[in-house]
């Protein structure tokens, strides 16, 4: 990885995320909805597509040999061993309905390892970022996860795809979790993870995501000291659990038993 300045690359893509977020704020009143994708609640707008094109075009110009995985179809193969994973607008339903936060997510993998991550919240003007091994930042300042209160006091983020099967699965998890934790918050997957990184949430779970939903947030959370896992020793798109270290045993045991 010595052939690339990861810190300079992080700054470049953080700027791209901010530019995409500015576009989203500017075009929110004039957006046009497209046809649903995988299911009726999987919505997409012309702003999602324009944001992705802005990001991917700039990545291609800077690193023409890199691969790109992008949610709205602007991906491509590459020959360099580096892969960019892009979600131009994580939380489209919140963005369109004006009912909650959303974010711009960009991660860089070298082979199978995430090495750069940026999650930008346009409405709040917050940019979370990380380079592997160098800690997590919020607007350039170091952040760290929660101290980890007992489960009965913990605030837990919940994220899931809104298709019928996953909603049923999430309902089972919430029925078991809610009476035993302090409270829950439903937030998009990337923000769930970076809110854990900033200590705003004590833990969280995400069900049936895609890699672009969690790739950036997961690296930022880990760099802030959040413990991540799933049904096995690592998190997955099927199940991602995060928690402060003292909370991890009780939260992960509960969720693994029902998810």
Image (cartoon, rainbow, N blue to C red):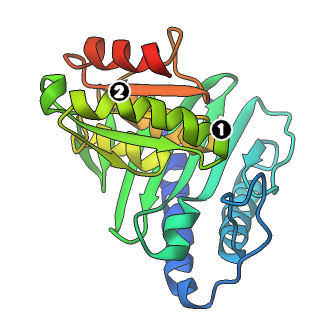
Give me the disc on residue 165: 1
Question: How many numbered marks are there?
Answer: 2
Quarter of the image with the N terminus in it:
top right
Say whether residue 134 is visible.
no
Instruction: Note whether residue 252 is visible.
Output: yes
Displayed quadrant of residue 125: bottom left
- Crowding at mark 1 (Cα within 10 Å: few <14, some 14-19, many 20+): few
Tell me the SS state at disc 1. Answer: helix
In this view, 148 is above or below 245: below
Q: Earlier in the sequence, mark 2 or mark 1?
A: 1
Residue 177 is marked as none
Q: Quadrant of residue 245?
A: top left
Q: Position of residue 60 (x, y in %)?
A: 77, 55
Residue 18 horizontal side relative to residue 199, left or right: right
Which residue is pictured at 65% across the width and 28% down the height? 110
The residue sitting at 70% across, 83% down in the picture is 32
10 Å crowding of disc 2: few (<14), some (14-19), many (20+): some
Q: For this rendering, which residue is in front, 194 or 99?
A: 99
Depth order, front residue of 203/146: 203
Q: Which residue is mark 2?
A: 176
Q: Helix or strand or loop: what does disc 2 sit on?
A: helix
Left or right: residue 137 versus residue 36 is left
Q: Is residue 37 above or below residue 132?
A: below
Seen at 52% across and 13% down, the residue is 231
- Residue 202 percent across, percent down from the top left: 23, 34
């Amino acid at each position: 990885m010595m052939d690339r300045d990861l810190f300079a690359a992080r700054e470049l893509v953080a700027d791209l995320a901010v530019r995409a977020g500015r576009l989203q704020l500017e075009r929110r009143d004039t957006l046009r909805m497209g046809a649903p994708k995988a299911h009726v609640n999987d919505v997409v707008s012309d702003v999602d597509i324009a944001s992705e094109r802005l990001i991917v075009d700039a990545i291609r110009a800077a690193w023409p040999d890199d691969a790109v995985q992008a949610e709205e179809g602007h991906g491509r193969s590459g020959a360099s061993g580096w892969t960019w994973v892009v979600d131009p607008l994580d939380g489209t339903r919140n963005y369109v309905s004006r009912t909650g936060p959303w974010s711009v997510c960009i991660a860089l993998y070298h082979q199978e390892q995430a090495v750069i991550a940026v999650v930008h919240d346009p409405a709040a003007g917050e940019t979370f970022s990380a380079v592997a091994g160098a800690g997590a930042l919020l607007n350039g300042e170091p952040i760290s996860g929660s101290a980890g209160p007992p489960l009965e006091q913990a605030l837990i983020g919940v994220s899931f795809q809104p298709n019928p099967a996953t909603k049923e699965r999430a309902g089972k998890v919430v029925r078991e979790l809610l009476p035993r934790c302090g409270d829950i918050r439903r937030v998009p997957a990337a923000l769930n993870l970076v809110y854990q990184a900033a200590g705003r949430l004590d833990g969280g779970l995400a069900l049936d995501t895609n890699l672009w939903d969690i790739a950036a947030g997961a690296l930022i959370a880990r760099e802030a000291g959040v413990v991540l896992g799933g049904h096995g020793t690592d998190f997955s798109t099927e199940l991602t659990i995060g928690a402060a270290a003292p909370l991890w045993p009780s939260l992960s045991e509960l969720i693994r038993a029902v998810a």
